[in-house]
Image (spheres, rainbow, N blue to C red):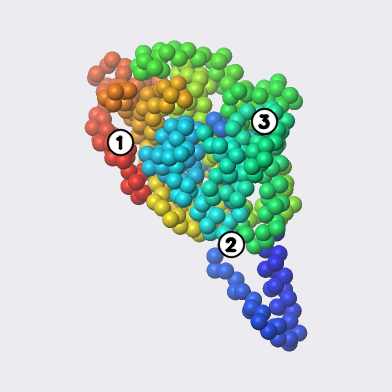
Amino acid sequence: MRRCRRLTLLLTAALALAAGLPLRPGAAAPPRPAAAPERPNVLLVVLDDARPEAMAALPRTTEWLADGTAYTQAVAATPSCGPSRATLLTGRYAHNHGVLHQADIGALDHTATLQRTLHDAGYATAAVGKFTNGWQLERTPPGFDHSALVGGGYTDARFMVDGRQRRVPYSTTFIGEQVNRYLDGFEAEDGKPWFVYASFTAPHAPYTPETRYAARTFAWQPSPAVGEADRGDKPAYVRRHKADQAAGDVIRLGQLRTLLSVDDALAAVREHLVRRGELADTLVVLVSDNSKFWGEHGLDEKFMPYAAAFRVPLYLSWPGHVPAGVDDRLASTVDVTPTVLAAAGLTAGYQLDGRDLRGPDRRDATLLEYWQDSHNGGYPTWSARYAPGDHQYTEYVEKDGTAGPREFYDLAADPWELVNLLGDKDPANDPDTAGDAATLAEWRQCAGAACP
């Protein structure tokens, strides 16, 4: 453990002083206790396409994180894997970090990331699992000392472990095991805190659960949005989709069954931390890059401006430093890096758009943004002002750059987003959107403290 050497020095010095012996020539005096707690280890767990409801398949993980805070109003700033992961690891909105599409990882400034900041501050660092879309697995990402990366999939998965190829029977199990191997390797670097980015491919499609979990069932009470019958108020691209409740249930069960193995893997990681005596010294963050439709509004994908695509689970746990309970503040994936750096007592060497979730700041609304991407089926560009419990205002942009449809949902009266007040052909109930439109125009160009 990283405190062993320091404790040995302190004990030796204390015994010498008690015996009336001088410290050996050249020996440093015992260090004074730090005024602030030591920097925590950081375990950032990222799921792939998981909804908040998917935590039902992670009972032991939920129990582990129960001594911390569950953020029940957390969103993915951009509900698309590549841009969202860049946001998680920079604390910046996509319009600032530049990864607007799945294949844009080359646009990322790797000097302005969470891992680079922690590494430069003396952390031992490792990335395990899916780093981000389009990354060459042979390359350890800048800011990480070690990497064991996979592009996706479950069975017979191809990993590149510190530059060497390895085939593994089941990716989820291997990710948990490799996290523990890296933790053991960090033991040799006594005195260093560590940062591990543990990114599971689950519950992303194609859903391939372990055989023992392939028939597991979970109760479900679909929301009124699942299989929505009248979608005449929705944009045309939404109406083209035809996913019903049965189709949504296939996705739901596939996701939950794959997540059962994630629960096993994380239970093994927790036990390893206990054996190493590091559980109390470790900040755990669990989040998903985005969510996934289970048939809401006839949809079976993500990428779209509805809650089932952008609402994500978000948990923080650090015994004695993060309060236990539920926090209903509006949180975003853009807040993960600022929160981790604040917990470590570090300041980023670049401008952050998000905020420390352990602090007092609260936002009433936040920015959601998405860019048309051929890798995602070509769904249109949009941005939205999202204020949960109040309303959501969305603007689309057509392929030629002209203004597209708009949507407005009164979330107080219509939490399931069933009636677009700007598309229901009833001008009498059209809301005044001038303020929202002006705000959204500002937010699309915001940076730093000017961002929501």
The residue labelled by disc 1 is: 440
Rounded to the nearest angstrom, the CA distance separating label 1 from label 2 is 40 Å
SS class, disc 3: strand
The residue labelled by disc 3 is: 157
Left/right of residue 406 with respect to residue 55 in the rendered view:
left
Is the residue under label 2 in contact with that under label 1 (CB below 8 Å)?
no
Mark 3 Cα within 10 Å, few/some/many (few <14, many 20+)?
Answer: some
SS class, disc 1: helix
Depth check, mark 3 against mark 1: the one in front is 3
Q: Residue at x 53, y 37 (%)?
A: 135
Q: Give residue 378's position: percent from left, percent from top.
A: 41, 22
On screen, residue 94 above or below 281: above
Rounded to the nearest angstrom, the CA distance separating label 3 from label 1 is 42 Å
Left/right of residue 373 with respect to residue 63 in the rendered view:
left
- The label on residue 38 is 2
* Residue 332 in view in this figure: no
- Nearer the observer, 259 or 159: 159
Amino acid type at mark 2: Glu
Q: How many numbered callouts?
A: 3
Viewport quadrant of the N terminus: bottom right
- Nearer the observer, 63 or 165: 165
Amino acid type at mark 3: Ala
* Residue 206 in view in this figure: yes
Q: Residue at x 36, y 15 (%)?
A: 236
Rounded to the nearest angstrom, the CA distance separating label 3 from label 2 is 38 Å
- The label on residue 129 is none
Q: Residue at x 73, y 76 (%)?
A: 12
